[in-house]
Structures are given as structure tokens and as C-alpha cells.
Image: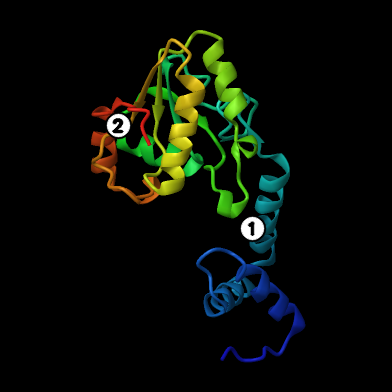
Amino acid sequence: MFPELPSKLLTAAVEELAKLPGVGRKTALRLVLHLLKQPREDVEQFGNTFIMLRNEIKHCTVCHTLSDTGQCAICSNPRRDHDIVCVVETIREVLSIENTQQYNGVYHVLGGIISPMDGIGPNDLTVEPLLQRVAAGNIKEIILALSTTMEGETTCFYLYKKLCGFPVAITTIARGVGFGDELEYTDELTLGRSIKNRQPFAGEQ
């Protein structure tokens, strides 16, 4: 049982940190006590950094990843292949794929996957902006790089049905990523090979 703390301020700080994923109250207490040992200006900078992040972070107007500016560094890079768009769930998958150094196209971040159990439907995702990008006629290939979970497969099938009427190739990552795996936790070598060895999406469910 977690002990009662001698300070309401300390308790409040611990409770806030304990809301973070994977942070229990013991870990939160250790972090708070560490912060209390730091110079006041360092702690103020620490707090202000997150306040600034929350207030000023933007979504790229093209691919919807997080960005400091209206258009992210990947979308504004003329050396990237803008004919190929890799559709992912969140910025975490963008970072995972970038770490493989096996992909030079651009991205489209859905902001999640279809999950009726969690109340997430197609209208909660950036599906319509993706369709608008494809309708503009400059894209030759769409890579569906979503987690191979049931929700991810459902989302891929939904996107396929929406995209199959356009003159674009629709591919998916190779099965080096096993069913039920999330891309964020797939090792870079496997993920890189899955991107390079991508295959046409069958459109079957």
C-alpha cells in the first residue's frame, strides 16, 4: 500500500505524474523528489517546455503528423518521393519507419485506427484528407502500414474500399510483421524489410 505523504503539494504532484502511461505512484514519487533537488530555474524550464508544447504544437497541413510549423520537415523536403504515401496510425509509426532508413516517400497519419469498442469510427480519423490527397492525382502508390491487429486489418480493408476506385497502387507491408503485432514495437530490421518487400493489398477479409 502506498504511504500517505506529508504534503498535499507533494501528493498532488505525484498523482499528476502517475497519470502518465507506465508510471506508477512509486516511480512518480521518485521523479518528483528528483525534481525538488534541482535548481528552481531548471524545474521552471521543465514545466514551461510542456506548457509550450501543448499550446504551440501543430499538425502538418499535409500529412497530419506533429510539427512546429504548418508543414512538417518530411512533407516540405523536395528530396522525398511524394508519389508514394505511407499510411500510418500515429507519429510513433512515422518515427519507427524513419529509423529503418528504408523508406523515402511521405506519410499520412490517420490519428488512430477504427475501433468500435473504443468508440473510434472512420469520421474520427483523417480519412477524408487522405482521399483528397489521392484525388488530386499526384500519388502513384498508397502503402497501408497499420498494425496487424484486428482493428488494424479492419482499417486497412475500409481504406482499400475507399481507395480502390482511384488509379493508384495499394500495397501493404510484408508479413515479416506477424499478425497481432504493433509497428511501434517491431524491430527496425524486420520493419525495414517489411516496407521494402511490400505487396499488393488483396482487398479480402
Residue at the spot of label 2: 195
Q: How many marks?
A: 2
**First along the sequence among labels 2 and 1:** 1
Badge nearest the viewer, 2 or 1? 2
- Quadrant the C terminus occupies: top left
Secondary structure at numbered mark 1: helix
Q: Separation of disc 2 and disc 1 at Cα?
A: 37 Å
Q: In the picture shown, does residue 74 fall above or below 178?
A: above
Q: In the picture shown, does residue 4 fall above or below 36?
A: below
Residue at the spot of label 1: 46
- Please name the residue shown 25% across and 39% down the image: 175
In the rendering, at what x and y percent does residue 181 appear? 34, 50
- Quadrant the N terminus occupies: bottom right
Residue type, label 2: Ile
In the rendering, at what x and y percent does residue 71 appear? 60, 24
Secondary structure at numbered mark 2: helix
- Please name the residue shown 66% across and 39% down the image: 57
Residue type, label 1: Phe
Residue 74 shows in this picture: no
In the rendering, at what x and y percent does residue 152 appear? 44, 43
